[in-house]
Amino acid sequence: MTVMEAIQARYSVRKYTDRPIELEKIEKIMKAGRLAPTSSNQQLCKHIIVTDKELIHQMVSACEEQKWIETASAILVECASGDRMMICGQSARSMDCAIAMSYMTLEAVELGLQSCWLSWFSPDKVKVLLNIADDYVVVAVAPIGYPEKDGHRSDKKLTKEVVVYNKMK
């Protein structure tokens, strides 16, 4: 599978089978996160994979009572310590975590898995539950597993609606 094929095959899943994710697949997904680029190569991210069913159950309360996440075999949690504003005005920590999560979710697709990035979660509750050090910030959370049924990508805008060459008018 090419990178573009993985991008085109990725879709958000909210119901998974109870099939556990094989250790070798988890290791490949974690490797993808580790190899992701980081601002100034600082490598401040931590890539957490939650596979313990009781912890996944407890993550429901940290994720605004989204009970469907319990169907996932694992939950990816992306966090980072330290931060600095890049010259462009963006948080290096947030950018680095987003890139790592993107790499991991695309690797998961190549391995036959799917995920769903969450926008509803309490970083503080996740930190407490997973014993994440005080100097870390939780940036992204994504349940992951084998989808219960085949899905499809959400519709995307046309290229001409989102791509600009050279200058915006």
Image (cartoon, rainbow, N blue to C red):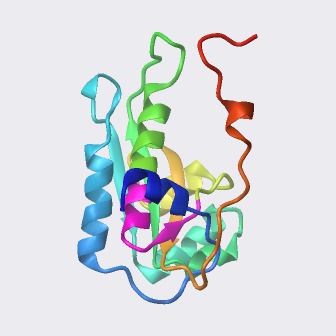
Q: Is residue 136 visible?
A: no
Please state the horizontal and vertical placement of residue 4, each as a whole percent of the image: 45, 51
Q: Quadrant of residue 163?
A: top right
Q: Does residue 52 appear to the left or right of 114 in the view shown?
A: left
Please state the horizontal and vertical placement of residue 143, each as a whole percent of the image: 53, 67
Residue shown at 51%/13% (left/top)? 88
Residue shown at 45%/59% (left/top)? 6
Q: Is residue 54 visible?
A: yes
Q: Indicate yes or no whether the magenta region holds residue 158.
A: no
Q: Which residues are magenta?
A: 104-116
Please state the horizontal and vertical placement of residue 130, each as a whole percent of the image: 43, 61
Q: Quadrant of residue 35?
A: top left
Name the residue nearer the viewer: 128 or 141.
141
State the quadrant of the C terminus: top right
Q: Indicate yes or no whether the magenta region holds residue 106.
A: yes
Name the residue nearer the viewer: 12 or 55.
12
Residue shown at 49%/89% (left/top)? 18
Residue shown at 32%/61% (left/top)? 29
Q: Does residue 115 appear to the left or right of 154 in the view shown?
A: left
State the quadrant of the N terminus: bottom left
Q: Is residue 37 above or below residue 124?
A: above
